[in-house]
Amino acid sequence: MNYENDMKTMVFIACAFGILLNATDKKQLLPDSNLIPGNSYYGTGKYIEYIHGNMPLVLTAPHGGYEKPENIKDRTKSSVKQDKRTLEMTLEISDVIYKLTGKRPYLVINRLHRVKLDPNRSEEIAVQGDSLARIAFDEFHEFIELAEKSIYDTWGIGFYVDIHAHRSKERKIELGYLLDGEVLSLSDNDIDDPFFVQNSSIRNLVSNSEYSFSNLIRGEVSFGAMLSKLGWEVLPSPQQHEPTSEKYFAGGYNTTIHAAPEKYNFNGFQIETHWEGLRDTDENMKKFCTDFVYVLRDYLKLHYNIDITIL
Ligand SMILES: [Zn+2]
Protein backbone atom coordinates (compact mmCIF):
# COMPACT_ATOMS: atom_id res chain seq x y z
CA MET A 1 0.00 0.00 0.00
CA ASN A 2 1.54 3.31 -0.98
CA TYR A 3 1.44 6.55 0.93
CA GLU A 4 -1.32 8.01 -1.22
CA ASN A 5 -3.61 5.04 -0.60
CA ASP A 6 -2.84 5.16 3.11
CA MET A 7 -3.87 8.80 3.20
CA LYS A 8 -7.05 8.04 1.28
CA THR A 9 -7.93 5.30 3.77
CA MET A 10 -7.27 7.62 6.70
CA VAL A 11 -9.35 10.40 5.19
CA PHE A 12 -12.15 7.92 4.52
CA ILE A 13 -12.07 6.65 8.12
CA ALA A 14 -11.96 10.20 9.49
CA CYS A 15 -14.94 11.22 7.33
CA ALA A 16 -16.94 8.15 8.28
CA PHE A 17 -16.19 8.77 11.95
CA GLY A 18 -17.17 12.43 11.55
CA ILE A 19 -20.46 11.51 9.94
CA LEU A 20 -21.09 8.98 12.70
CA LEU A 21 -20.32 11.56 15.37
CA ASN A 22 -22.60 14.09 13.72
CA ALA A 23 -25.37 11.56 13.38
CA THR A 24 -25.24 10.57 17.04
CA ASP A 25 -24.68 14.16 18.20
CA LYS A 26 -27.80 15.48 16.61
CA LYS A 27 -31.07 14.95 18.41
CA GLN A 28 -33.89 13.59 16.27
CA LEU A 29 -36.49 16.24 16.93
CA LEU A 30 -39.64 14.30 16.11
CA PRO A 31 -40.57 10.62 16.20
CA ASP A 32 -40.81 9.03 12.76
CA SER A 33 -44.52 8.32 13.06
CA ASN A 34 -47.63 8.64 15.21
CA LEU A 35 -47.38 12.39 15.81
CA ILE A 36 -50.57 13.61 17.44
CA PRO A 37 -52.09 16.98 16.41
CA GLY A 38 -52.26 19.30 19.42
CA ASN A 39 -49.49 17.42 21.25
CA SER A 40 -46.22 19.12 22.22
CA TYR A 41 -42.77 17.86 21.27
CA TYR A 42 -39.62 19.51 22.57
CA GLY A 43 -36.09 20.26 21.52
CA THR A 44 -32.99 20.09 23.74
CA GLY A 45 -33.66 21.35 27.28
CA LYS A 46 -37.32 21.96 26.34
CA TYR A 47 -36.29 25.40 25.10
CA ILE A 48 -38.18 25.04 21.83
CA GLU A 49 -41.71 23.64 21.72
CA TYR A 50 -43.28 22.16 18.60
CA ILE A 51 -47.01 21.47 18.59
CA HIS A 52 -48.08 19.17 15.81
CA GLY A 53 -50.91 20.20 13.51
CA ASN A 54 -53.37 18.89 10.95
CA MET A 55 -54.09 21.90 8.79
CA PRO A 56 -51.91 23.89 6.33
CA LEU A 57 -50.93 26.67 8.74
CA VAL A 58 -47.74 27.33 10.72
CA LEU A 59 -47.64 29.93 13.51
CA THR A 60 -44.41 30.88 15.27
CA ALA A 61 -43.81 32.82 18.48
CA PRO A 62 -40.11 33.76 18.63
CA HIS A 63 -40.20 36.57 21.22
CA GLY A 64 -42.82 35.59 23.82
CA GLY A 65 -40.71 33.20 25.95
CA TYR A 66 -40.05 33.53 29.69
CA GLU A 67 -37.25 31.14 30.57
CA LYS A 68 -33.85 32.48 31.58
CA PRO A 69 -31.63 29.47 32.38
CA GLU A 70 -28.38 30.45 34.04
CA ASN A 71 -26.33 28.13 31.83
CA ILE A 72 -27.14 30.25 28.77
CA LYS A 73 -25.31 33.57 28.54
CA ASP A 74 -27.33 36.79 28.36
CA ARG A 75 -27.39 38.45 24.96
CA THR A 76 -25.98 41.96 25.06
CA LYS A 77 -26.33 43.15 21.47
CA SER A 78 -29.61 43.92 19.65
CA SER A 79 -33.01 43.98 21.41
CA VAL A 80 -33.52 41.71 24.41
CA LYS A 81 -37.10 42.76 25.22
CA GLN A 82 -39.87 40.20 25.28
CA ASP A 83 -42.92 40.64 23.01
CA LYS A 84 -45.37 40.51 25.90
CA ARG A 85 -48.15 37.93 25.78
CA THR A 86 -47.41 36.83 22.21
CA LEU A 87 -46.79 33.27 23.40
CA GLU A 88 -50.26 33.30 24.99
CA MET A 89 -51.71 34.92 21.86
CA THR A 90 -50.31 32.16 19.65
CA LEU A 91 -51.85 29.46 21.86
CA GLU A 92 -55.15 31.37 21.96
CA ILE A 93 -55.27 31.57 18.15
CA SER A 94 -54.71 27.82 18.03
CA ASP A 95 -57.57 27.28 20.51
CA VAL A 96 -59.96 29.51 18.52
CA ILE A 97 -59.08 27.58 15.35
CA TYR A 98 -59.69 24.31 17.15
CA LYS A 99 -63.12 25.46 18.39
CA LEU A 100 -64.07 26.57 14.87
CA THR A 101 -62.65 23.68 12.86
CA GLY A 102 -61.69 20.80 15.15
CA LYS A 103 -58.19 21.11 13.62
CA ARG A 104 -54.88 22.37 14.96
CA PRO A 105 -52.31 24.62 13.28
CA TYR A 106 -48.62 23.72 13.61
CA LEU A 107 -46.94 25.88 16.28
CA VAL A 108 -43.25 26.52 16.96
CA ILE A 109 -42.61 28.39 20.19
CA ASN A 110 -39.37 29.73 21.61
CA ARG A 111 -39.78 29.27 25.37
CA LEU A 112 -36.49 31.07 26.09
CA HIS A 113 -36.64 34.75 26.97
CA ARG A 114 -35.26 37.02 24.27
CA VAL A 115 -32.34 37.90 26.55
CA LYS A 116 -31.18 34.28 25.99
CA LEU A 117 -32.16 33.70 22.35
CA ASP A 118 -33.65 35.73 19.53
CA PRO A 119 -34.41 33.24 16.75
CA ASN A 120 -35.70 36.04 14.52
CA ARG A 121 -32.15 37.22 13.82
CA SER A 122 -29.26 35.79 11.84
CA GLU A 123 -27.46 33.18 13.93
CA GLU A 124 -24.60 35.38 15.08
CA ILE A 125 -26.90 38.05 16.54
CA ALA A 126 -29.44 35.43 17.66
CA VAL A 127 -27.13 33.43 19.94
CA GLN A 128 -24.13 35.70 20.49
CA GLY A 129 -21.63 32.89 20.94
CA ASP A 130 -23.58 30.66 23.33
CA SER A 131 -23.47 26.98 22.34
CA LEU A 132 -26.77 25.98 24.03
CA ALA A 133 -28.56 28.96 22.49
CA ARG A 134 -27.13 27.88 19.13
CA ILE A 135 -28.67 24.42 19.51
CA ALA A 136 -32.04 26.00 20.38
CA PHE A 137 -31.71 28.35 17.38
CA ASP A 138 -31.09 25.44 15.02
CA GLU A 139 -33.96 23.45 16.51
CA PHE A 140 -36.40 26.38 16.25
CA HIS A 141 -35.77 26.66 12.53
CA GLU A 142 -35.65 22.92 11.98
CA PHE A 143 -39.05 22.49 13.64
CA ILE A 144 -40.52 25.09 11.27
CA GLU A 145 -38.98 23.29 8.33
CA LEU A 146 -40.41 19.96 9.54
CA ALA A 147 -43.86 21.56 9.90
CA GLU A 148 -43.71 23.05 6.41
CA LYS A 149 -42.55 19.77 4.90
CA SER A 150 -45.35 17.89 6.66
CA ILE A 151 -47.88 20.41 5.32
CA TYR A 152 -46.47 20.34 1.81
CA ASP A 153 -46.55 16.53 1.75
CA THR A 154 -50.23 16.57 2.73
CA TRP A 155 -51.75 19.68 1.09
CA GLY A 156 -49.12 20.84 -1.41
CA ILE A 157 -49.53 24.41 -0.18
CA GLY A 158 -49.27 26.23 3.15
CA PHE A 159 -49.38 29.51 5.04
CA TYR A 160 -46.98 30.92 7.65
CA VAL A 161 -47.46 33.69 10.22
CA ASP A 162 -44.70 34.94 12.53
CA ILE A 163 -46.33 36.54 15.59
CA HIS A 164 -44.89 39.64 17.27
CA ALA A 165 -45.67 42.72 19.32
CA HIS A 166 -44.53 46.32 18.88
CA ARG A 167 -44.07 48.84 21.66
CA SER A 168 -45.50 51.88 19.88
CA LYS A 169 -48.47 53.66 21.53
CA GLU A 170 -50.27 53.57 18.18
CA ARG A 171 -53.14 51.10 18.06
CA LYS A 172 -52.07 49.69 14.77
CA ILE A 173 -51.46 46.18 13.46
CA GLU A 174 -48.55 45.96 11.05
CA LEU A 175 -48.30 43.19 8.49
CA GLY A 176 -44.83 42.58 7.08
CA TYR A 177 -44.55 41.19 3.56
CA LEU A 178 -40.80 41.97 3.32
CA LEU A 179 -41.57 45.30 1.63
CA ASP A 180 -40.10 48.23 3.51
CA GLY A 181 -41.77 51.62 3.98
CA GLU A 182 -40.06 53.09 0.95
CA VAL A 183 -41.48 50.38 -1.31
CA LEU A 184 -44.96 50.78 0.19
CA SER A 185 -44.84 54.49 -0.63
CA LEU A 186 -44.74 53.62 -4.36
CA SER A 187 -47.86 53.64 -6.55
CA ASP A 188 -49.77 50.38 -7.09
CA ASN A 189 -48.49 50.32 -10.63
CA ASP A 190 -44.86 50.58 -9.53
CA ILE A 191 -45.27 48.08 -6.70
CA ASP A 192 -46.59 45.47 -9.16
CA ASP A 193 -43.10 45.25 -10.64
CA PRO A 194 -41.90 41.60 -10.66
CA PHE A 195 -38.82 42.62 -8.69
CA PHE A 196 -40.91 43.52 -5.62
CA VAL A 197 -43.13 40.48 -6.09
CA GLN A 198 -40.09 38.19 -6.10
CA ASN A 199 -38.74 39.71 -2.90
CA SER A 200 -42.05 39.53 -1.04
CA SER A 201 -43.33 36.90 1.39
CA ILE A 202 -46.36 36.08 -0.81
CA ARG A 203 -44.47 35.58 -4.08
CA ASN A 204 -45.76 32.00 -4.49
CA LEU A 205 -49.34 33.22 -4.10
CA VAL A 206 -48.96 35.96 -6.70
CA SER A 207 -47.89 33.55 -9.41
CA ASN A 208 -51.15 31.57 -9.00
CA SER A 209 -53.54 34.44 -8.34
CA GLU A 210 -55.94 36.35 -10.55
CA TYR A 211 -55.36 39.43 -8.36
CA SER A 212 -52.58 41.95 -8.76
CA PHE A 213 -49.73 42.02 -6.24
CA SER A 214 -50.72 45.48 -4.98
CA ASN A 215 -54.30 44.28 -4.44
CA LEU A 216 -53.01 41.26 -2.47
CA ILE A 217 -50.81 43.53 -0.35
CA ARG A 218 -53.17 46.46 0.34
CA GLY A 219 -56.25 46.26 -1.90
CA GLU A 220 -59.75 44.92 -1.28
CA VAL A 221 -58.66 41.26 -1.23
CA SER A 222 -55.71 41.80 1.15
CA PHE A 223 -55.48 40.41 4.68
CA GLY A 224 -55.26 44.03 5.85
CA ALA A 225 -58.59 44.88 4.17
CA MET A 226 -60.35 41.92 5.76
CA LEU A 227 -59.02 42.71 9.24
CA SER A 228 -59.84 46.42 8.83
CA LYS A 229 -63.46 45.55 8.09
CA LEU A 230 -63.72 44.13 11.61
CA GLY A 231 -62.63 47.46 13.08
CA TRP A 232 -58.85 47.03 13.43
CA GLU A 233 -56.41 49.60 12.11
CA VAL A 234 -54.00 47.76 9.81
CA LEU A 235 -50.98 48.69 7.74
CA PRO A 236 -50.91 47.96 4.83
CA SER A 237 -54.62 48.06 3.96
CA PRO A 238 -56.91 50.06 1.62
CA GLN A 239 -57.15 52.66 4.41
CA GLN A 240 -53.40 52.89 4.88
CA HIS A 241 -51.11 52.11 1.98
CA GLU A 242 -47.83 53.18 3.54
CA PRO A 243 -46.29 53.92 6.95
CA THR A 244 -46.85 57.37 8.45
CA SER A 245 -43.87 57.05 10.77
CA GLU A 246 -40.38 55.70 10.26
CA LYS A 247 -40.88 52.69 12.49
CA TYR A 248 -42.51 50.03 10.41
CA PHE A 249 -41.73 46.32 10.69
CA ALA A 250 -41.52 44.87 7.20
CA GLY A 251 -40.70 41.33 8.39
CA GLY A 252 -37.59 39.81 9.91
CA TYR A 253 -35.36 36.77 9.60
CA ASN A 254 -38.16 34.22 10.16
CA THR A 255 -40.33 35.76 7.47
CA THR A 256 -37.40 35.90 5.09
CA ILE A 257 -36.49 32.25 5.64
CA HIS A 258 -39.85 30.57 6.25
CA ALA A 259 -42.72 32.60 4.77
CA ALA A 260 -42.20 31.75 1.12
CA PRO A 261 -39.91 28.79 0.47
CA GLU A 262 -40.64 27.73 -3.08
CA LYS A 263 -39.97 24.05 -2.36
CA TYR A 264 -42.90 23.93 0.08
CA ASN A 265 -45.15 26.32 -1.88
CA PHE A 266 -45.63 28.56 1.16
CA ASN A 267 -46.71 32.16 1.61
CA GLY A 268 -47.02 34.23 4.74
CA PHE A 269 -46.25 37.38 6.66
CA GLN A 270 -45.08 38.80 9.96
CA ILE A 271 -47.69 40.37 12.21
CA GLU A 272 -46.89 43.08 14.77
CA THR A 273 -49.60 43.80 17.32
CA HIS A 274 -50.13 46.72 19.69
CA TRP A 275 -50.75 46.55 23.45
CA GLU A 276 -53.70 48.79 24.34
CA GLY A 277 -56.97 47.36 23.14
CA LEU A 278 -55.42 44.15 21.86
CA ARG A 279 -52.96 42.38 24.20
CA ASP A 280 -53.74 44.33 27.39
CA THR A 281 -56.69 42.27 28.69
CA ASP A 282 -57.86 38.68 28.22
CA GLU A 283 -61.09 39.98 26.70
CA ASN A 284 -59.33 42.14 24.10
CA MET A 285 -56.91 39.38 23.25
CA LYS A 286 -59.77 36.89 22.76
CA LYS A 287 -61.59 39.38 20.53
CA PHE A 288 -58.49 39.90 18.38
CA CYS A 289 -57.67 36.20 18.12
CA THR A 290 -61.26 35.41 17.11
CA ASP A 291 -61.26 38.14 14.44
CA PHE A 292 -57.83 37.02 13.22
CA VAL A 293 -59.02 33.43 12.81
CA TYR A 294 -62.19 34.42 10.94
CA VAL A 295 -60.13 36.56 8.57
CA LEU A 296 -57.65 33.74 8.10
CA ARG A 297 -60.53 31.39 7.26
CA ASP A 298 -61.88 33.81 4.62
CA TYR A 299 -58.40 34.60 3.30
CA LEU A 300 -57.43 30.95 2.78
CA LYS A 301 -60.82 30.25 1.17
CA LEU A 302 -60.49 33.16 -1.25
CA HIS A 303 -56.82 32.76 -2.16
CA TYR A 304 -56.10 29.04 -1.63
CA ASN A 305 -59.61 27.66 -2.20
CA ILE A 306 -59.13 25.83 1.10
CA ASP A 307 -62.01 25.78 3.59
CA ILE A 308 -60.40 25.17 6.99
CA THR A 309 -63.79 24.30 8.50
CA ILE A 310 -64.16 21.22 6.29
CA LEU A 311 -60.58 20.02 5.84
ZN1 LIG B 1 -40.84 40.51 18.00
Image (cartoon, grey):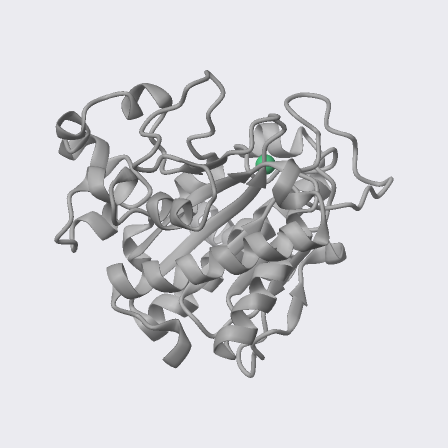
Quarter of the render that holds ligand 1 = top right
Residue at image point 55% right, 33% down: 171
Q: Residue furthest bottom?
A: 34
Q: Position of residue 307 (x, y in %)?
A: 33, 73
Q: Position of residue 23 (x, y in %)?
A: 57, 61
Q: Quick one: quadrant of the C terminus? A: bottom left
Q: Position of residue 101 (x, y in %)?
A: 48, 76
Residue 233 in sight from this viewpoint:
yes
Left or right of 288, for residue 85: right
Residue 13 in sight from this viewpoint:
no
Residue at image point 36% right, 22% down: 181
**Quarter of the view holding residue 24:** bottom right
- Front residue of this view, candidates 278 and 64: 278
- Front residue of this view, candidates 111 and 33: 111
Residue at image point 61% right, 62% down: 50
Residue at image point 51% right, 50% down: 10
- Front residue of this view, candidates 303 and 229: 229
In the displayed structure, 79 sits above or below 46; it is above
Q: Position of residue 139 (x, y in %)?
A: 59, 53
